Structure formats: C-alpha cells, structure tokens
Image: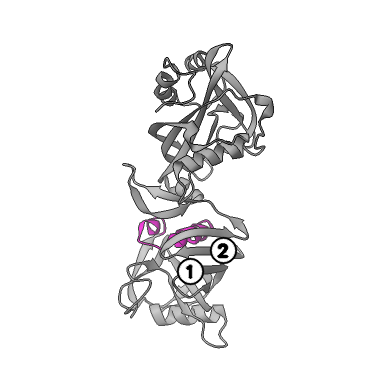
Amino acid sequence: MKNASLCYIERGGKYLMLLRNKKPDDPNEGKWIGVGGKLEPGESPADCARREIREETGLTALDLISFGRVYFKSDVWEEEIMHLFLVTDFEGEVTDCDEGELHWIDKNEVFDLPLWDGDRIFLKYLLDGRQFDEMTLDYHGERLCGCRVDSVEKELLDVFNEDGSPAGYVASREYVHWKGLWHATVHIWIAGENDGKPSLLLQLRAADKRLYPSCWDISAAGHIPSGEAALNGAMRELAEELGIHVSPDEFAYLGTMKMTYDDDDDGGYHDREHCRIYLLRRQVDLSGLTLQASEVERVMWMTLEEIMESLENGGLNHCLHKEELAFIRPVILADDWKGTGFN
C-alpha cells in the first residue's frame, strides 16, 4: 500500500492547483490535484509534504495544517493512504513543475475543474475548515462508489445535466445541494378512498427535518442513490418510510418533473431535482404501518378535493407542489381509478 501526502496551498482566496499533463502513463492525466507524492523511507507525512512542495512548486511551507487521512481503495490501482494538508503561510516564488502546470485557482472555481469525484468531497471539508480522522474513498475504475467519513457512510448521487442527461460523475448529497446540481429523486403517491372519495395518503414530516419540518407531504419520497434504478428507489423508500412492501408491477410511472428550491440561509441549500413520479393504488390500513421515526411523525388520508382546496386557501400546513398535484390529478380521477393498475 502506498503512503503519500497531498497539499493544498492557499493564497488570497485561491488554491495552487496542479494540472497533471506532463508525466508519462500518469493515472492522474488531465486531472487537477494538489501537490504531493509518496513518503520516502523513514520520512514522516509532514516532512514528505514539505519536500514535495519544495520540489514541485519551489515554495517553502512555513505551516502545515493536517486535515486527516484519506484511504483510497480501488479495483484497478494500488491502494493508498494519503495525508491531507493545507498550507496558508509560505515563502518563495512558484517555479515550473515537471509533472504538470501550476495555476492559482479561486477556491470556489476549483470544484468546476476536472477532478476525481472523491477530491470534491475532501476539498469541501478543506474549504469549510472541517478536519476529520479518516475518509475512505472506494473506486471502481474512475467511478466513486463509496465514501465513509469517520465511519459514517456518505450518500452518493449521480449528477445530471438540466436536460436529464448524465453529467458523468458522482457527488455526495451534501455537495450536490451546496452546488445546486441536478440529481434524481422519486415521489410515491398512494391513492385510495376516504369517505368513498378519491384520496391520497399524506405523511407528516418529522419535526427535526432541516427542510419543511412538521409539514404534510407526499406519501413517500427520497433521493435515488448512485447506481440505483428509480423503480427500486420507489420500492425502497416505501419500505423504509412506511413499512409497505410492494412488487414493481404494482406501481404506475406517471412521468418526470423538474423541481427547484433555493435557501441561502445557513450556508446555502440548493435543490435541482429530476423527480420520477409513481402512483400506487392501495387501500392502506394506517394502523398497520411501520413509520420511520427520523422521517415521518404520522400519516392520514385526505380527499383530493380537500388537498386542492387547501392549496388555494392555506388550510393545511404542507409542502406539496400545486403543479405536481395538477399533474397526477387526471390519473386519479380517471374512470378506472379504483382498478389495480393502469398502463
């Protein structure tokens, strides 16, 4: 296993970034990274960092701030433990590097460069000044397929373009909402009857949710993790949030809607969703549900007319989308709405 140091040098709101484009057979070819390299025998991570900074940039580091260890696992390359450092005090002038081109890049613009997917995760920790003990990044080829920070699994999402085409990389859920990147979600509506009228099952979001606490919401919903099919995501969310287990052929796929939301408070939260909408026709016994305490406080049936009315007069504390309800309403009111399915 390789043992290495990686350093990011900061000056005036910029990082000194290395575009790797000079080294033959370089696995980092075309990627932007910090400066660093392998530890020599008997060398400490800090001593390695200082030596690599001097050799690759011509600068002398006067301080080294340790941010943690990053453990790279791969099915292609040798596994590596990388010691991450930030340098904010140095002397000297930048010289040419024989491994690539050195450029000062604005810290926020760094994330838009061609990076390894995992680099975006630890660079966000660096940007926020959040140190960690150990981060594990698990790669299959160049694709990031797993991330743990101090033993906590991080949810990874596939990133999309606004038109729904794949952007070609994976990012953590936290990063996706910080940058406002398009990603896939799933909404599941359960349709049944209440007082003999077409009704929908609504859930009350938990009081400690960051967004829309204690608001009435869709029957079940959630992000689609990287690599998961939307239909599998719908089945999983129903099982997790409500304890309802169904087969794939019980769902009706109604279509995809684009949804956006922005909250600039508390560091910023930006939501850009390609939302897959599914309908499940089932007369659910509420007493038999198993609610996920961290997500759902309680559930209730509400007629479609009552829901639409509440959207107009504000009679219900909710976070439902009027456009989405208008989208699904014709299907629920169709003549065969009591049927077991529709295609």
State yes or no: discs 2 and 1 in contact (Cβ < 8 Å): no
Q: Which residue is painted at 50% across and 26% down in the image?
A: 320
Q: Position of residue 308 (x, y in %)?
A: 48, 16
- Given the image, on which type of amino acid does mark 2 rest? Met
Please indicate whether residue 256 sits to the left or right of residue 306 in the image: left
- Given the image, on which type of amino acid does mark 1 rest? Ser
Answer few, some or many: residues within 10 Å of disc 1's Cα (few below 14, many 20 plus, some between 14 and 19).
Answer: some
The reply to whether the magenta stretch includes residue 127 is: yes
Q: Is residue 316 among the parts visible in the rendering?
A: yes
- Secondary structure at numbered mark 2: strand
Q: Position of residue 176 (x, y in %)?
A: 45, 48
Mark pair 2, 1: CA separation: 14 Å
- The quarter of the image holding the C terminus is top left
Please indicate whether residue 141 sits to the left or right of residue 79 in the image: left
Extent of the magenta region: 107-129
Q: Earlier in the sequence, mark 2 or mark 1?
A: 1
Please indicate whether residue 228 sits to the left or right of residue 166 in the image: right
- Secondary structure at numbered mark 1: strand
Look at the magenta stretch and give its main secondary structure. helix
As drawn, which residue projects farthest toward the bottom?
A: 41
Which is in the foreground here, disc 2 or disc 1? 1
Q: Which residue is painted at 54% across and 88% down in the image?
A: 41
Q: Is residue 130 among the parts visible in the rendering?
A: no
Please indicate whether residue 79 sits to the left or right of residue 259 in the image: right
Q: Position of residue 278 (x, y in %)?
A: 46, 32
**Marking on residue 113:** none
Indicate whether 79 appears above or below 124: below
Q: Which residue is painted at 48% across and 69% down in the image?
A: 74
| Foreground residue among 37 and 243 | 243
The reply to whether the magenta stretch includes residue 238 is: no
**Marking on residue 135:** 2
Task: Identify the residue under disc 1.
Answer: 74
